[in-house]
Amino acid sequence: MSSVAVAERMLAAIQAVSPGAEAGIEVMDTQNGMLLAATNQDQQFYTASVVKLLIALDVLDDPAAQSDSTTTDAVRRMLSASDDGIADRLWESHGGAAIVTRMSDRIGLSGTSPAADSGQWGETLTTARDVVAVYRYLTSSAPEPVRTVVLGALGEASQTAADGVDQYFGIPNALSDSPWAVKQGWMWMASSLILNTTGLVGSDLRYAVVVLSSQPTMSLQTAGSALTAGVQVLRDALPPQVR
């Protein structure tokens, strides 16, 4: 089955639970660049907390930060518990929107742009293709100390986030029997719920899975079930050892 067909089945499964949902999907084998699923991968969506990946990479770009336990502990907490308070502090202290510009230039993110309101990091815009590029950078180009901190935190994502939200939807639920390292995102924008499930899966974390969505306002539980349904469709397209 083609990558487009797989992604369209994933999108149909999402919309069956959440009618009217829009989603950008890209799934890639990061070791050889093969696409397993792709649709709307260049459509921009709000990052919500997925932008914390860029914050973490920017903060840890300084070798001094890589060896400072206070900084690395803060980055781990920001990622694993999706702690907004830590993200606020690091965003402000490292230049706000300049973080997005710096890391976009470093990684080559053509579809990512800072929020119109520079104080609202969650309103950064990105694409599924760009988030996959972030994961490829993390696994292949980021310095080893950075990779260790970030992947360690993503692999220890807690079920309950710092704000009390259950962040086990999409990848952690649909691929619960496979190793994963995830960064989820959620926020409300006017009449829409932004809900994103992104991460690396497999015994060697070689498959990047990114589903960005904008859904009609509903409960987080229902919206999360929609993304879980979408990722469950993906299972059949992944190698048996990942399922």
Image (cartoon, helix red, strand yellow):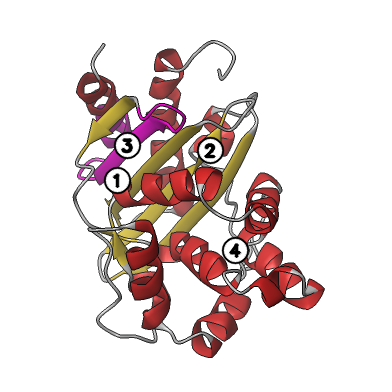
Mark pair 2, 4: CA separation: 17 Å
Q: Which residue is mark 3?
A: 26
Q: Please, which residue is most extreme toward the right here?
A: 69
Kind of residue at badge 3: Glu
Q: Quadrant of the N terminus?
A: top left
Give percent across and percent down for residue 177: 65, 24
Query: Which stretch is magenta?
Result: 10-33
Question: Do the residues bearing badges 4 and 3 touch, measured as CB atoms within 8 Å?
Answer: no
Residue 217's place in the image compared with 26, above or below, is below
Kind of residue at badge 2: Leu
Q: Which residue is mark 2?
A: 200
Label 3 crowd (10 A; few <14 / some 14-19 / many >=20): many
Mark pair 4, 3: CA separation: 22 Å
Mark pair 2, 3: CA separation: 12 Å
Q: Which residue is mark 1?
A: 129
Is 25 included in the stretch rendered in magenta?
yes
Tell which of 8 and 62 is nearer to you. Answer: 62
Tell which of 242 and 158 is nearer to you. Answer: 242
Kind of residue at badge 1: Arg
Q: Which residue is mark 4?
A: 82
Give percent across and percent down for residue 14: 32, 35
Mark positioned earlier in the residue sequence (2 or 4): 4
Label 2 crowd (10 A; few <14 / some 14-19 / many >=20): many
Q: How many marks?
A: 4
User: Which numbered mark, 4 or 1, is in the foreground of this view?
Assistant: 1
Question: Do the residues bearing badges 4 and 1 touch, measured as CB atoms within 8 Å?
Answer: no
- Residue drawn at x 67%, y 45% as measured from the top left: 155
Mark positioned earlier in the residue sequence (2 or 3): 3
Tell which of 158 and 183 is nearer to you. Answer: 183
Residue 77's place in the image compared with 121, above or below, is above
